[in-house]
Amino acid sequence: MRIGTVELANNLIMAPMAGITDQPFRRLAREGGAGLVCTEMISATALVRRDDKTLKIMSLAADEHPVSVQIFGSEPAIMAEAAQIAADGGADIVDINFGCPVRKIVKSGAGVKLIENEARMTAIMEAVVGRVTVPVTIKIRIGREADENVAPHIVKRAAASGIAQVTVHGRSAVNFHKGLPDLEAVAAAVRAAPMQVIGNGGIIDELTAKDFLDKTNCAGLMVGRGAIGDPALFRRISHYLSTGEMMQAPTREQRIDCLKKHARMAADHYGERRGVILLRKVMPYYLKGLPNASRIRNEFNQIETLLALDAVLEKIGESPYFINDAGDRGYYENE
């Protein structure tokens, strides 16, 4: 797949997720088979102000390219300047967020709020495209309200503004991540689009990926929450789409090893204590469904060192049996 001048190894893209898709996560996703990875959503205003925390979010590693930097905001001039900073910082692609439904973002006039203001939305796209030489893409939802689909109109407006590709999330903003994506709404955007459309929403495994492609005819897929704790999902999806064969899911040992690697990378990137603390939110995803996982989950909130993490993970390998009051052996409940 090609986006403008950028060649991807496949048509699978790691979705930008606030607080999740930092540099360590992106590097693991690339290693796990993603054709393109995206930064978490970055405030254009904070980037222009050279906020230290924001610059840290945007810091890119050599082994994560090609990488897209996603920015949000409501002022065309600021968005254009932020895009230039991102491109100067190594972004292969600049993505504009027109889909975030979070109240704080919408209240600021950014994210999905902009699909109600075509003039402002167009001004932002044209300002960013006119400022940078790298490809510019956008991410949208099918609408703000239920049963709304403005995506077919937006993709046409985007093409006229010089946008290289559009990602369409198949849910309305009011639904956030709940319910099934409206694949027919995405398909309508694909039919209307003069450029490639990437589909997003509800893709959690090989079967949902194939179903999305078959029913929408999208050029590719953006995978988000399904890859948390399972960065190799991209490789398995790619293999299944190419061959029709399922690869083996990661074993317990492989999942634990990947979590440990993620923790080491986070510690290197942020410093040990901060890196391990920030990783707490994704640790349960790595261990979901494993024996003893729910019983030690609360211990994750106490972890501040790699040594402490190793000690907790050792408990995953302990016997999943317990002795009840009657002396019978049985499995832990709710595992």
Image (cartoon, grey):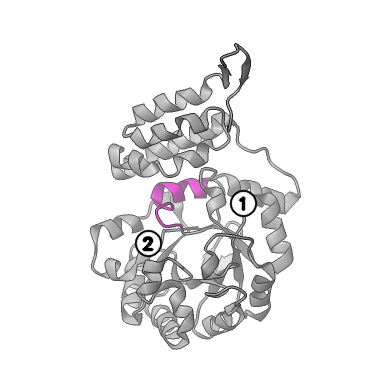
C-beta proximity under 8 Å, tags 1 and 2: no
Q: Is residue 275 visible?
A: yes
Residue 177 higher or lower than 155, as above or below? above
Residue underneath mark 2: 90
Picture coordinates of residue 335, whole percent (x, y): 58, 32
- Looking at the rendered structure, the kind of residue marked 2 is Gly
| Magenta stretch bounds | 17-31
Residue sitting at x 36%, y 78%: 74
Residue sitting at x 59%, y 47%: 233
Q: Which mark is residue 299?
A: none
Residue underneath mark 1: 204
Picture coordinates of residue 239, whole percent (x, y): 68, 48
What secondary structure is found at the residue carrying circle 2? loop
Residue 193 higher or lower than 18, as above or below? below
Residue sitting at x 56%, y 28%: 291
- Looking at the rendered structure, the kind of residue marked 1 is Ile
In this view of the protein, which residue sits in the foreground, 2 or 217?
A: 217
- Residue 20 colored magenta? yes
Number of marks: 2
